[in-house]
Image (cartoon, rainbow, N blue to C red):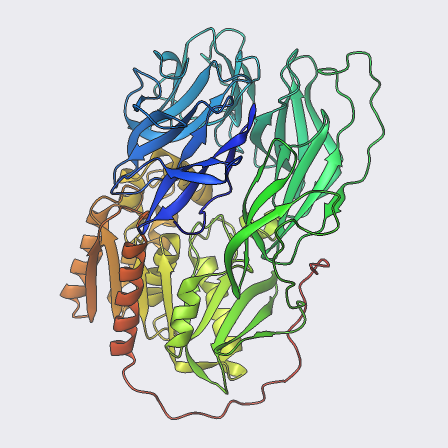
Amino acid sequence: MTQAFQSPGFAALAADRAVETRLVEERWQAVAWDRRTDRRRVVTDRPEGVHLSEIEPDGEAIWWFDSDGAGEGRWWREPFTGGARGAALHGVPPGRAYGVAFDRTGALAAVAVGTGDTSHCYVGPPAGEARPIGSAPGHLGLADLSPDGRLLALGGCPDGDDAVLLWPTDAPSHLPEDRAPCSVPSNASSNAPAGATRLAGSPRLRLWPIEFNPLAVREPELLLVVEEDERYSVATWRADSGLRRHPELSFDSQISAGWYGGPHGVLIQHERAGRSRLLLADLGPSAALSPSAEPAPPTPAREIRTPGGTIHDLSCAPDGTLHCVWSRESTPPRPLVLRPGAEKPLHPAPDPTPDHAPERDDDTRRSRRWTPQPYGRIHSFVSTPAGPGPWPTLFLVHGGPATHDRDSYDPRVNALVRHGYAVVRTNYRGSTGYGSGWQYDYGHRVGLAQIEDLAAVRAELVADGTALAERTGLCGFSWGGYLTLLALGAQPELWTLGMAAQPIADYPATYRTTTPALREVDRQLFGGTPDEVPERYRAADPRSYVHRVRSPVLLVASRTDERCPPEQVDRYAADLRRLAVPHELHWVDGGHYSRRTADHRSVLEAMVRFAGRAWPAPLPRTPRGDRPGAPTDPMEGGEQP
C-alpha cells in the first residue's frame, strides 16, 4: 500500500478504528485501519477502484460505494474485522452517490442517490431495509443526519429557492417532477414532508449546509457556510431561532467549516490565492445546548500554525487531533497530523519557501505571477526548466470552473517540465479562492472571459522572455479541456497546440446529456438553458469556432463518461477531419475521472508524445528581452507561512 488519497474517516464511538482510501496495486481501495495495532486490512478489490468509503460511528462496519465507469452503483457494507459483505441498505436502487450519513450511535443510516434526473433519500438501520423519505428533481446532496436521527439536511443549488432542505425522517416527501431545485421561483409552494423547512438562497445570498452539531441532541443545530455581500461566513440554524449569522467569522474568499472540540467550537479552512489556512473559533452558547444561556460576546478566531501549501483533505479524530493530506508545489502529498495548541505538528511537513522567493530544485524553477487587468489581477503558478528561457510553454488549464490551481503538488507539471516545457497554471475568472466577484462577475460570458485571461497571461510571459510565442499551447482536463478547444478556435493566432481530455466539445449537446448536477451548474453559469439563452451557448460553444482551428489537436475521451459524454467529442473530431486539421482521438477507460493510476499515466504519456510530434525540434533561442531579475509579487492578503 502507498500513501492515502484522503484523510481517514474515524469511528466517533470507537477511537481505535478508522477507514482510509489508499492506493493498492495502482487502484484506490477502501482500507480498514486498526489504530491500536497500527495494522491495515484492504477491504475492497474493485477493478475500477473505490473513492467513497465511510465507517459506522461504533466502528462495527465499513461502507463503500461500488460504482461503474459511469459513476453509478450501490453502497456495500462489511464488518471492520472482515467477514461477509452485503448491501449497506436493502431496497436502495443503484444510482449516483449523493451522500451518506449516520445518527449519533449508528443505529440509523441515511443515503441519497441520483437516478436519471431525480434525487432520492432513504433511511434505515445498517444492513436493514431502507425506507424512502423523499425524492426531488435535479441534484440534492445529503449533508448530514441529525444526532437523534429525526432530521435530514440536504443541499440544492446554493443560490436557488431550495438551497437547504430540512426533511423529517418520519414523513415521506415528493416534489413535483416539473420542478428542479435550482429553477423554482422564490414564492413557489413546496410539497416537502409535513414539518419540513426550506432555506432559500439568491444571487446575493448563497447557502451551503455542512453538518449537525454532534452534541446538540435535544434540538438539532445545523452549521452552514453563507456567502453574502461578497463575504463568506459561518452560520447556524435551529428550528426555534432560524438562521443565525456569525459576522465575526467573515472572510473574503471561500471557506469550509466543521464542528470541533466542545459544544460551541468550529474549525474553519480558508482558501485564498492558492493556499490553505486553518482557524479555530468559539460560537458561544446556543439554546440547543444551554437554554438559559445569554449570547456570549464573539471571540476572535485563532489560527492554527500550518506550513504554507494546500490542505487537500482533513478529518478530526475522536481525541481532537487533525489528520490532513497536505502538499505544496515541490512536495508530494503527505500526512500532516496537528493538535491545535501544540507548538509543532505531530507529523510535520517541511517549512516552505517564502512567497517572495521563487522556489528552485535541481530541475525546476517555480514562481507565482500576478497579471494586472482592468478588472483585477490574474494569478498564475509558473514552473520552468532550469536554465535560461524562453521555453515552449503549455498552459495546464484547470477544470471546474468552480475550483482553482493551488500551491500543491501536480505530477503532470513535473513530467512536462522534465520534457523541456514551461508549465503555467492560471486561475482565470470563475475560479474559487479569490472572492465571489472573481468567481461570478463576468456577465455570463462563459468561456470567453476565461480565455481572455489565458491570453493576457500568455502575452506577459512572451513579453518577459518566459514563453516562446510560436510555441505556446493549451492542455486541459474536463472544463479545462473545454477552454482548450474554445481558445484554439476563438484565438487561433495565439495557440499552436491543444490537448483536451474529457472535454466539453459541443456545449448545447453536453447540457442535454450530462448529469443533473452539471446541468444546474450550467444554468447558473449561463443564466438559463440552451433553449432560454441560445445566443450565450452559441458564443461559448467550441463547435462555433471549429472552422477557425489550425493547430494540432489531441482529444482524449471515455465511452463511459457521463459528465462530458463521448458522442459530442466524436462530433468535434468529425469536424476536424472534415476540415483537415491535424488531430488524434485517444479513447480511454474509467469514465470522466478514472480511479486507476495507469489510466492517468497513459493519458499523460499520450500528451507528451503528441506535443513532441507537434513541436518536433528545438527552435533557435530568441533573445529573452528585458526580463527583470526581481522576485515576483508576493501573494496578497498576508498569505505567508
Q: Does residue 482 sit above or below 268 in this rendering?
A: below
> Residue 139's spot in the image, x, y percent?
40, 29
Asked whether residue 71 appears in the rendered view, the answer is yes
In this rendering, position of residue 520 left or right of residue 609: right
> Residue 598's spot in the image, x, y percent?
28, 56
Classify residue 485 by image quadrant: bottom left
Camera-nearest residue between 603 and 84: 84
Give the residue displayed 48% in from the left and 58% down from the top.
449
**Quadrant assignment for the C terminus:** bottom right
Asked whether residue 51 appears in the rendered view, the answer is no
Camera-nearest residue between 257 and 187: 257
In this rendering, position of residue 280 left or right of residue 7: right
Q: How many marks?
A: 0
Camera-nearest residue between 118 and 5: 5
Give the residue displayed 47% in from the left and 48% down from the top.
444
Return the residue found at the far front.
37
> Residue 220's spot in the image, x, y percent?
62, 16
Q: Does residue 73 sit above or below 191 in this rendering?
A: below
Camera-nearest residue between 447 and 51: 51
In this rendering, position of residue 490 left or right of residue 288: left
> Residue 620's spot in the image, x, y percent?
38, 93
Return the residue found at the far left.
578
Give the residue displayed 73% in from the left and 59% down from the top.
638
